Image: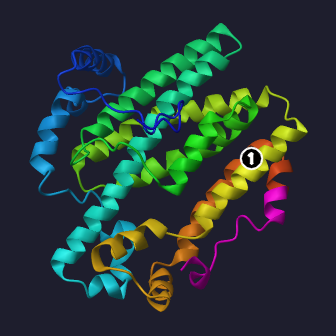
Amino acid sequence: MRQLYKTAGLDLPHASESDKLHRVLSSAIQHRCRIHPTTSTALLANPLVETQEFQRTTESNCYAYWNAQHFNLHNTRIFQQATPEEQTLILRVASQGLLEEAYFIEKAGVGYMAKMVMLSETTEERMLYALFSADETYHLAQIMRFLPHHQPAGTDDAFLRFLADLVENEDKTVILFVLQVVLEGWGLSHYRTLAKGCQHPEFAQVLTSFLADESRHHATGVTLFKQHPLSPNSRKVIVETLAYFLQMIQVGPQRVVAAIEQVLGPLSRYQKIQLFEELETETHSGTRLALLHSLIGKETAGTILQDLEARNAFRPLPAYLCA
């Protein structure tokens, strides 16, 4: 078994269906649902028990949780010219990509919060992170209900590898700022957008239910980061880490293009440039980069922001550089 990321646990396997731990875990998660103040009746079902049944009903028909408008595919000629069957498959592949990304993010979140329990400097901080780890566990269990086939065993996705590498970092100031201030803040907007565009009412409700938790995680990161002096070395690592992350945003909706290629086959460079133009890649990336610019600048008095601006890290790339 590969164990590339011990803390993030991206390669951590699931217990067999016959393992008695499932029963205990399911009971604990159901109890958490009942006492959680934001939990609605629709979310009180046993997520781990229902997962198997939900997967059986969707395995032969992977659900397209988000439509063409969500991915901006309705404006592209290649999608318009595809057959109805190809269009459906493209949306399923793109939706599965978003779903698996959420699964791995929450899986890494459980490990990150557990790590922060050990790095805590006060009893109250340790208590908070223990509660936050429970939040991430609940989120992971809820997302698992909607995975159509199985729990992914690992991933080669560049963003998720970046996230896992970051979770392994031992500099508390770095992970506080990048993970909880920037990425949790960005994740709030991401989950809100996913919930708004989701075509599956119950899953949309699940995603909405995450927002209050993620807001607390972000606010705690902001508070604790302000209590930690920013050393020159930590500042340098933060700048380098964020510059790499922002590059992934600058290159536009690569996963959407990859979903099209997975269904329709490889595209030529000319076709890719045209597709990125029709996906309005500069607008797509620009909106996300503007949000990240605000999150970074708001909490750093401009010091980290200035270094990133000097690298043009917030400038979206044109289509011909994304292809």
Q: Is residue 258 above or below residue 139?
A: below
Identify which residue is drawn at 30% across, 22% down.
33
Identify which residue is drawn at 54% across, 48% down.
161
56 displayed left or right of 117: left
Is 315 inside the magenta-drawn segment? yes
Give the x, y percent position of residue 99.
Answer: 34, 50
Residue farthest along the front direction in this orientation: 1
Image quadrant in which you'd find residue 317:
bottom right
Image quadrant in which you'd find residue 79:
bottom left
Identify which residue is drawn at 75% across, 32% down.
173
Residue to which mark 1 is pinned: 298
Residue farthest along the bottom direction in this orientation: 270
Is 317 inside the magenta-drawn segment? yes
Residue farthest along the right direction in this orientation: 232
| Colour scheme in use | rainbow
Give the x, y percent position of residue 1.
Answer: 40, 35
- Return the residue nearer the eye: 196 or 160: 160
Q: Is residue 211 above or below residue 99?
A: above
- Return the residue nearer the eye: 10 or 78: 10
Give the x, y percent position of residue 190.
Answer: 48, 51
277 displayed left or right of 1: right
Question: Which range of residues does the magenta coloring cover?
Answer: 307-323
Give the x, y percent position of residue 130.
Answer: 52, 17
Identify which residue is drawn at 53% across, 80% down.
323
Q: How many badges with numbers are in the image?
A: 1
Query: Secondary structure under badge 1?
Result: helix
- Which residue type carries mark 1? Lys
